[in-house]
């Protein structure tokens, strides 16, 4: 008897564990403290907790609900939304979990949102109801691509346009669809907006999501774009729509068969004492097993303590111990681990060398590979730059930005630990005659779009506004699939809210990539990065490196040369011969024209990166560029380089601008 009960208990608990895992899946989060952060024990925190309790009580009968509590600066607005196709049980469990997770992943932020695949929870210290918001955003996709995009693309576009139209026109703001894109393959899609926004706002939100999807991942086997007010998703691997049919009521219990002869006027049990004891023991044992298995179920996903020299992820202080480094997992490696991984920073593990130090390949004892940037003792990048790069990268998450996985700061040693990029940097392919043919047009186009999306994220889509200031091919890394990732944020600048530009007395960058206004006055803005992107775009199309006047056999730099050919209708003369004329003519012409627009002398005439992304997507007409008559080689430059790492200022001081232009050195891995 006991064995039967235990087996049944095990099966029941195992099934319960699977059901809990299958109920909801966390996807991503967005945190914002630009306008307001709260403190522990504050009135705002108490109002937030009260409001969460109010929201969860509504999940048994609603799949969307909004409310607010408090007044003045302590008023909290919050809402939840579940997918219309999930059951109320799943909705309730998802939202309840979200109220706990949002506090964990966005601690003390005045505004935050968490997305699950089944629900969304959001709060803010501002009015957010009936307003369409597309910031912050999050994405999920699969690195595997569909086999035949030429067939899949039109089907996907048709499916997305259909669900967007249907979702916008229905009161629930939800629609799903499925369509065949080959004999045996289907694409499943759905679109959803929060029902408090009007049809027009819903349509605009979903179209924006579709535009983002086209730019990031529409060749993947599945993808999803999350906005606070809408989400869009497709999948080719399996249906993800719940049936959500009303559950049939359980059948009534079968009446017990009672022997009339045994009936008496009282209701005492007729079970023998031995049977009662057996049942009691069985139930007790079963409860013990249930408790143990429930404990295992709840904690079975807890990660094991790192081994083989891999540090715990618990330390999250800045290298100088000044506070939190961000709201993501960030490892603090010990120096001994990194020395072991690099064989004591041996020359054979050296991947590249730049102005601030040497990059080594590291292999942990578990086989995991890393790229480790060791700042040299004579490096011009001091503690300030080290802190800047650590802080920036720890807070940034995008598929086209290199991932900083940790740091080490022991004594005079300062090291940054990155994900390892097996294909090194873009310049190793682009400017090597032997490797350049490996960059066919499809690969180059993917690299161009990836860099553009990464810059758009830095300038517009992250909760920080960051100017890179040193964008060049050697600072664009390539993963195993030749996807680009922007790297090296040692010179990056963080802009305050509403800040449009900054100014410095210390000009640092690389010849040929610095914007004219930056070279002349020290003024930088997002348009400075746009200029650098334009130079890179022309380099990627032509396979030629931008040269200054005294280094160029053409007696002109690349932008001026490209503009003359474009003006004469001879765009294809600049196309890289290594492409063997295998490319889309329209794409090449478009890229050259966009590159010329990005390198306009007047910064105000350059497009923003979101506009560049739209132009690259072919969704809008291109304006005509002006001649880049004032190119970088026309500035009067001194050969006396003056650098004081501690005098970098974001305010004009009236002092003579000093500058340092680095040659394009090896800053990242050369494949061995």
Image: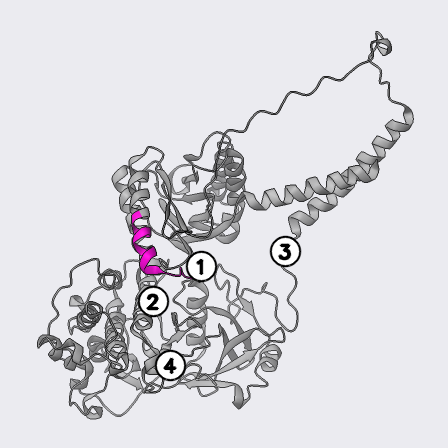
Looking at marks 4 and 1 on the same chain, the residue that comes earlier in the sequence is marked by 1
Please give the range of residues in magenta. Answer: 143-158
Q: Main SS of the magenta segment? A: helix
Q: In the picture provided, is 468 more to the left or to the right than 614?
A: right
Looking at marks 2 and 1 on the same chain, the residue that comes earlier in the sequence is marked by 1
Mark 4–mark 1 Cα distance, whole angstroms, equals: 43 Å
As helix, strand or loop, the secondary structure at mark 2 comes to helix
Q: Residue 450 bears which disc, if any?
A: 2
Q: How many residues crowd mark 2 within 10 Å: few (<14), some (14–19), many (20+)?
A: many
As helix, strand or loop, the secondary structure at mark 1 comes to loop
Q: Residue 302 bears which disc, if any?
A: 3
Q: Which residue is mark 1?
A: 142
From the image, state whether disc 4 or disc 1 is nearer to you.
Answer: 1
Mark 4–mark 3 Cα distance, whole angstroms, equals: 44 Å
x, y percent for residue 477: 40, 75
Q: In the picture provided, is 440 more to the left or to the right than 245?
A: left
From the image, state whether disc 4 or disc 3 is nearer to you.
Answer: 3
């Amino acid at each position: 008897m006991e064995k039967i009960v235990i087996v049944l208990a095990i099966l029941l608990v195992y099934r319960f564990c699977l059901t809990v895992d299958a109920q909801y899946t966390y996807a991503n989060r967005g945190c914002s403290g630009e306008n307001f952060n709260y403190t522990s024990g504050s009135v705002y925190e108490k109002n937030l907790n009260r409001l969460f309790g109010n929201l969860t009580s509504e999940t048994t009968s609603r799949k969307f609900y909004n409310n607010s509590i408090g007044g003045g600066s302590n008023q909290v607005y919050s809402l939840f939304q579940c997918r219309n196709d999930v059951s109320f049980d799943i909705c309730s469990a998802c939202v309840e979990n979200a109220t706990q997770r949002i506090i964990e992943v966005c601690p003390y932020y005045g505004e935050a949102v968490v997305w699950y695949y089944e629900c969304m929870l959001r709060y803010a210290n501002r009015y957010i109801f009936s307003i369409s918001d597309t910031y912050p955003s999050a994405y999920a996709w699969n690195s595997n691509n569909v086999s035949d995009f030429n067939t899949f693309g039109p089907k996907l576009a048709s499916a997305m346009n259909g669900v967007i139209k249907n979702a916008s026109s229905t009161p629930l703001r939800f629609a799903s669809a499925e369509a065949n894109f080959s004999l045996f393959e289907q694409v499943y899609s759905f679109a959803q907006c929060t029902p408090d926004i009007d049809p027009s706002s819903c349509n605009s939100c979903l179209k924006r999501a579709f535009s983002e999807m086209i730019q990031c991942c529409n060749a993947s086997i599945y993808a999803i774009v999350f906005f606070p007010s809408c989400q869009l998703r497709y999948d080719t691997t399996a249906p993800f729509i719940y049936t959500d049919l009303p559950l049939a009521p359980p059948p009534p219990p079968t009446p017990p068969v009672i022997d009339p002869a045994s009936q008496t006027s009282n209701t005492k049990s007729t079970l023998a004492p031995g049977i009662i004891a057996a049942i009691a023991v069985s139930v007790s044992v079963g409860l013990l097993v249930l408790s143990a298995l429930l404990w295992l179920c709840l904690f079975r996903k807890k990660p094991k303590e790192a081994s083989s020299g891999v540090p715990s992820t618990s330390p999250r202080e800045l290298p100088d111990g000044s506070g939190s480094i961000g709201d993501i997992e960030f490892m603090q490696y010990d120096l001994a681990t990194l020395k072991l991984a690099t064989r004591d920073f041996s020359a054979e593990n050296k991947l590249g060398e730049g102005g601030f130090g040497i990059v080594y390949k590291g292999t942990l004892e578990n086989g995991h590979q890393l790229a480790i940037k060791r700042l040299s003792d004579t490096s011009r990048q001091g503690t300030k730059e080290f802190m800047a790069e650590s802080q920036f990268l720890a807070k940034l998450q995008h598929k086209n930005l290199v991932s900083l996985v940790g740091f080490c700061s022991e004594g005079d040693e300062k090291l940054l630990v990155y994900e390892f990029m097996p294909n090194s940097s873009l310049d190793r392919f682009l400017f090597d005659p032997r490797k350049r043919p490996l960059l066919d047009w499809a690969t180059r186009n993917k690299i161009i779009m990836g860099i553009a999306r990464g810059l758009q994220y830095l300038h517009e889509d992250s909760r920080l506004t960051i100017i890179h200031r040193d964008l060049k091919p050697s600072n664009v890394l390539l993963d195993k699939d030749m996807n680009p990732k922007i790297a090296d944020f040692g010179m990056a600048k963080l802009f305050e809210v509403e800040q449009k530009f900054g100014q410095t007395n210390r000009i640092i960058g690389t010849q040929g990539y610095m914007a004219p206004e930056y070279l002349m006055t020290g003024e930088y803005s997002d348009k400075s990065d746009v200029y650098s992107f334009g130079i890179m775009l022309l380099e990627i199309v032509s396979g030629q490196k931008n040269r200054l006047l005294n280094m160029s056999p053409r007696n002109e730099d690349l932008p001026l040369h490209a503009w003359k050919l474009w003006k004469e209708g001879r765009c294809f003369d600049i196309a890289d011969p290594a492409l063997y004329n295998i490319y889309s003519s329209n794409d090449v012409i478009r890229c050259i024209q966009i590159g010329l627009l990005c390198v306009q002398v007047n910064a105000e005439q350059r497009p923003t990166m979101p506009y560049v992304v739209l132009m690259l997507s072919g969704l809008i007409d291109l304006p005509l560029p002006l001649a880049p008559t004032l190119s970088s080689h026309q500035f009067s430059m001194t050969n006396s380089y003056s650098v004081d790492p501690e005098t970098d200022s974001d305010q004009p001081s009236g002092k003579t601008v000093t500058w340092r232009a680095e040659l394009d050195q090896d800053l990242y891995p050369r494949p061995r």
